[in-house]
């Protein structure tokens, strides 16, 4: 049977996806305004829910509160430096919820796929962290690789309970790893609170992380960004944020 020609609707959808990808790239380039500069040394990869070494959480010294208030009242001589973090993963893995929790917002009820991108800017004492999430639908995954070389760290979210689509997640992750061999990657095994969630050992094997170059910084952290129980300020999210601060410092 001869292949059927593409209908007008399919062509229109494909064209719209291409335009959307181009627009996303232009907007992100303008948003960042610079190329990536390395700020870390190579180290050994760390696996498991508890990293071997967590960075210390930087907090303001209470004794310096008055000085901080006075400094805030004066015009800044220069803006804080920016760090860029790209948050990717298949649709439904928890990327949008991760950004909401980091920004102090409660998770949304139900699954609402991202049909474009979301961004959050979080200030720290020494720099600002820009987190960009790009939708994980099949049409948008094609454009992921266009952003990898523009960021400092990649966060790849995985639904630990989605066994059926785990091979797709593995394929997309390794495409990104091949695109930039030096970019640090934090793989977040999300939804660990679900009964059907895969263990960290299983995920390490299924995602092929044991085959990654040992000289590359790859981290696998367990998390429940939006746990089924009450509250959303869970330790897993805090560990991710602390690790990001260490990599970006």
Image (cartoon, rainbow, N blue to C red):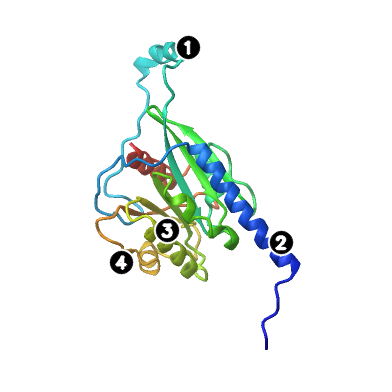
Mark 4: few/some/many CA within 10 Å (<14, 14-19, 20+): few
Q: Does residue 216 appear left or right of residue 154 in this picture?
A: left
The residue beneath circle 4 is 211
Q: Residue at x 50, y 40 (%)?
A: 102
What SS does tag 2 mark?
helix
> Where 65 sits versus 181, above or below?
above
Q: Does residue 18 appear left or right of residue 50 in this picture?
A: right
Residue 86, position as x, y percentages in the image: 46, 47
Looking at marks 2 and 1 on the same chain, the residue that comes earlier in the sequence is marked by 2
Foreground: disc 2 or disc 1:
2
Q: Give yes or no for contact between labels 2 and 4 (Cβ–Cβ under 8 Å).
A: no
Residue at mark 2 to residue at mark 3: CA–CA distance: 28 Å
Mark 1: few/some/many CA within 10 Å (<14, 14-19, 20+): few
- Determine if residue 194 is in view: yes
Looking at marks 2 and 4 on the same chain, the residue that comes earlier in the sequence is marked by 2
Q: Does residue 136 appear left or right of residue 49 in this picture?
A: right
Q: Quadrant of residue 16?
A: bottom right
> Where 177 sits versus 84, above or below?
below
Residue at mark 4 to residue at mark 3: CA–CA distance: 15 Å
What SS does tag 1 mark?
helix
The residue beneath circle 1 is 73
Foreground: disc 2 or disc 3:
2
| Residue 176: numbered disc | 3
Q: Residue at x 35, y 50 (%)?
A: 183
Residue 179, position as x, y percentages in the image: 40, 58
Residue at mark 3 to residue at mark 1: CA–CA distance: 43 Å
What SS does tag 3 mark?
helix
Quadrant location of the C terminus in the rendered image: top left
Residue at mark 2 to residue at mark 1: CA–CA distance: 52 Å
The residue beneath circle 2 is 12
């Amino acid at each position: 049977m001869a292949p059927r020609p593409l209908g007008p609707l399919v062509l229109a959808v494909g064209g719209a996806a291409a335009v959307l990808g181009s627009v996303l790239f232009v907007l992100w380039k303008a948003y960042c305004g610079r190329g990536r500069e390395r700020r870390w040394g190579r180290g050994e990869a760390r696996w498991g829910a508890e990293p071997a070494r967590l960075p210390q959480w930087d907090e303001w010294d209470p004794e310096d509160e008055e000085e901080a208030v006075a400094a805030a009242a004066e015009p800044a001589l220069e803006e804080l430096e920016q760090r860029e973090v790209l948050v990717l993963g298949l649709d439904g893995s928890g990327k949008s919820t991760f950004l909401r929790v980091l920004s102090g917002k409660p998770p949304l009820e139900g699954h609402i796929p991202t049909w474009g991108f979301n961004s959050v800017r979080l200030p720290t004492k020494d720099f600002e962290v820009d987190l960009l999430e790009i939708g994980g639908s099949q049409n948008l995954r094609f454009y992921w690789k266009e952003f990898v070389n523009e960021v400092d760290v990649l966060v790849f979210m995985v639904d630990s309970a989605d066994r059926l689509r785990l091979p797709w997640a593995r394929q997309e992750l390794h495409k990104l790893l091949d695109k930039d061999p030096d970019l640090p990657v934090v793989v977040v095994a999300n939804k660990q609170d679900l009964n059907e969630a895969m263990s960290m050992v299983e995920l390490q094997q299924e995602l092929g992380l044991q085959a990654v170059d040992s000289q590359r910084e790859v981290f696998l952290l367990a998390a429940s960004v939006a746990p089924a129980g009450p509250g959303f300020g869970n330790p897993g999210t805090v560990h991710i944020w602390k690790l990001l601060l260490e990599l970006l410092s």
